[in-house]
């Protein structure tokens, strides 16, 4: 299924989020698109609800350091285990959600077989975790902000712990970072039944580049 995302506002957000990293050292980058759901549904975000994201990367836009063949391999992203720690509704109707825990796994696979089934979880989610593990990491922080109109942003910091690309981290904490845009049905996103959001995100990996949590607050101001 093609993802027809409105990238105008998102482009500004991604530039601002990435600025602290690019100002210091280059990073290994991949971009991905997909869908997210939360048990209990968004934007309710009750304590303990789990956020799950399933996405597919664009190999043609991946850093060569990942050694992926765009013509014959797919790269899938699976984020799970993010549990709602708190959800605060602001006076303007936007919702800030903080999560605890969570894992990200990135796989490369010669079978071009990813499927977003309706009403997850379904067995088809396994199509995002087959193949060889390219990168895995545990989240040390993850935040999601959705405005009253149905779109927003998310970002999180990651400790790389497994996969061939985890060697880039060289054991350093918070060596990876994911961020992107989140789009609900209210803004015309084409979302399969049972999923809550359409996602357009980026993963960057570099042990030498510290992330700055303050940058997320600056970008959130664009959505209020």
Image: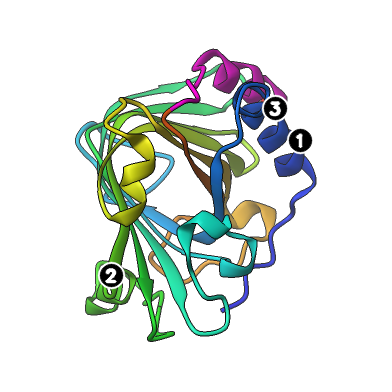
Label 3, residues with CA under 10 Å away: few <14, some 14-19, many ≥20: some
Along the viewing direction, whichever of 136 and 143 lies nearer the viewer: 136
Q: Nearer the viewer, mark 2 or mark 1?
A: 2
Please name whichever residue, 205 or 1, is drawn nearer the observer in this view of the structure: 205
Q: Who's the residue at 30% across and 25% down the image?
A: 173
Check disc 3 and report its element: helix, strand or loop.
helix
Question: Is residue 170 depicted above or below 190 in this figure?
Answer: above
Q: Which residue is mark 1?
A: 12
Q: List the residue tagged with mark 3.
A: 16
Q: Residues within 10 Å of mark 2 (few under 14, many from 20)?
A: some
Marks 3/1: CA distance?
Answer: 6 Å
Q: Secondary structure at mark 1?
A: helix
In the rendered image, the quadrant that contains the C terminus is top right
Residue 182: assigned label: none
**Reading the chain from its start, which is encountered first: label 3 or label 2?**
3
Question: Outermost residue toward the right?
Answer: 8
Residue to which mark 2 is pinned:
132
């Amino acid at each position: 299924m093609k993802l027809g995302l409105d990238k105008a506002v998102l482009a500004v957000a991604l530039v601002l989020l990435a600025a602290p990293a690019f100002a210091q050292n280059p990073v290994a980058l991949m971009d991905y698109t997909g869908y997210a759901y939360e048990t209990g549904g968004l934007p309710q975000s009750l304590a303990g609800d789990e956020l799950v994201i399933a996405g597919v990367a664009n190999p043609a836009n991946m850093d060569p350091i990942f050694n992926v063949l765009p013509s014959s391999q797919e790269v899938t992203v699976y984020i799970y285990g993010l549990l709602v720690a708190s959800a605060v509704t602001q006076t303007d109707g936007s919702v800030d959600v903080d999560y605890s825990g969570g894992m990200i796994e990135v796989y490369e696979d010669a079978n071009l077989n990813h499927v977003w089934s309706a009403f997850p979880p379904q067995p088809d989610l396994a199509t995002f975790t087959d193949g060889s593990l390219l990168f895995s990491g545990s989240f040390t922080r993850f935040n999601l902000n959705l405005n009253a109109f149905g779109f927003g942003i998310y970002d999180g910091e990651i400790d790389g712990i497994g996969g061939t690309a985890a060697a880039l981290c060289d054991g350093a904490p918070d060596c990876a970072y994911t961020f992107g845009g989140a789009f609900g049905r209210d803004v015309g996103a084409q979302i399969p039944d049972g999923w809550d959001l359409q996602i357009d995100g980026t993963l960057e990996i570099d042990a030498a580049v510290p992330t700055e949590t303050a940058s997320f607050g600056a970008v959130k101001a664009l959505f209020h």
